[in-house]
Amino acid sequence: MSLATFEDGNRWLDQTKIRFENASDAEPEVAIVDPIVKSHLIGAFPNDVGQWDESGTPESTPELVRTICGMLMASFRYAKKYSEETTEPSSYSGQLYAQAMLMLEQLRNGTLTLEDVNLESQIALIQGDFWPNNTTLVTSDMDLPMLDTGDPLRMFSMEQEF
């Protein structure tokens, strides 16, 4: 399964001159791009990379990774298309490739982050898990200055001087 769709690649292509018609049309580029991206990111996101395309659709892939894949797909399509017309490399293709590879490197070294990665905790914490909290109250047998029975038990207040 792929990390990006042909539409992700089309975002970087001039639709009047060159484009991906459908998923089948994009398969050659996807076959090149997916291993490149996965191999660059597996070290930084070892528990996530394998799950991004697990569902069979790229929707589980973070948007930034899909953008990078789209840039690389477009770069390879441009390079292939324009290699038929000229022996000079396509500057746009080279720019897309360089920018995508820079972004991969930045993700790998931590200077660029995946904003839409869901890092939801698997632990359900409640107020009682933190202490002191408002569930700990002063009792009548405690002799604490500036606190009355029933007040939340605090070790200091804003009025106290240290």
Image (cartoon, helix red, strand yellow):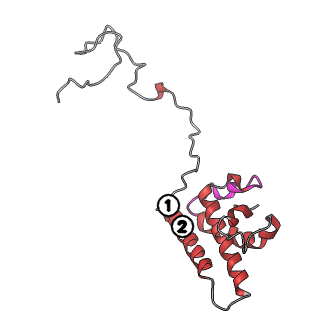
The amino acid marked with disc number 1 is Leu
**Residue visible at 73% across and 69% down?**
30
* Stretch in magenta: 43-57
Residue pointed to by mark 2: 103
Q: Relative to residue 159, is residue 54 drawn left or right? A: right
Q: Main secondary structure of the magenta part?
A: loop
Q: Relative to residue 131, is residue 90 drawn left or right? A: right
SS class of the residue under badge 2? Answer: helix
**Residue visible at 59% across and 46% down?**
118
Mark 2 Cα-neighbour bin, 10 Å: few <14, some 14–19, many ≥20:
some
One can see residue 38 in this view: no
Q: Quadrant of residue 44?
A: bottom right
One can see residue 88 in this view: yes
Q: Closest to the observer: 51 or 137? A: 51
| Mark 2 vs 1, N-terminal side | 2
Residue pointed to by mark 1: 112
Q: Where residue 104 sits in the image (x, y, percent)?
A: 56, 67
Vertical order, 110 against 92 (above or below): above
Q: Are marks 2 and 1 in contact (CB under 8 Å)?
A: yes
Separation of marks 2 and 1 at Cα, in angstroms: 7 Å
Q: Is residue 52 magenta?
A: yes
The quadrant of the picture occupied by the C terminus is top left
**Residue visible at 65% across and 60% down?**
66
Q: Quadrant of residue 3?
A: bottom right
The amino acid marked with disc number 2 is Met
The quadrant of the picture occupied by the N terminus is bottom right
Residue at the far left in the pictured view: 161
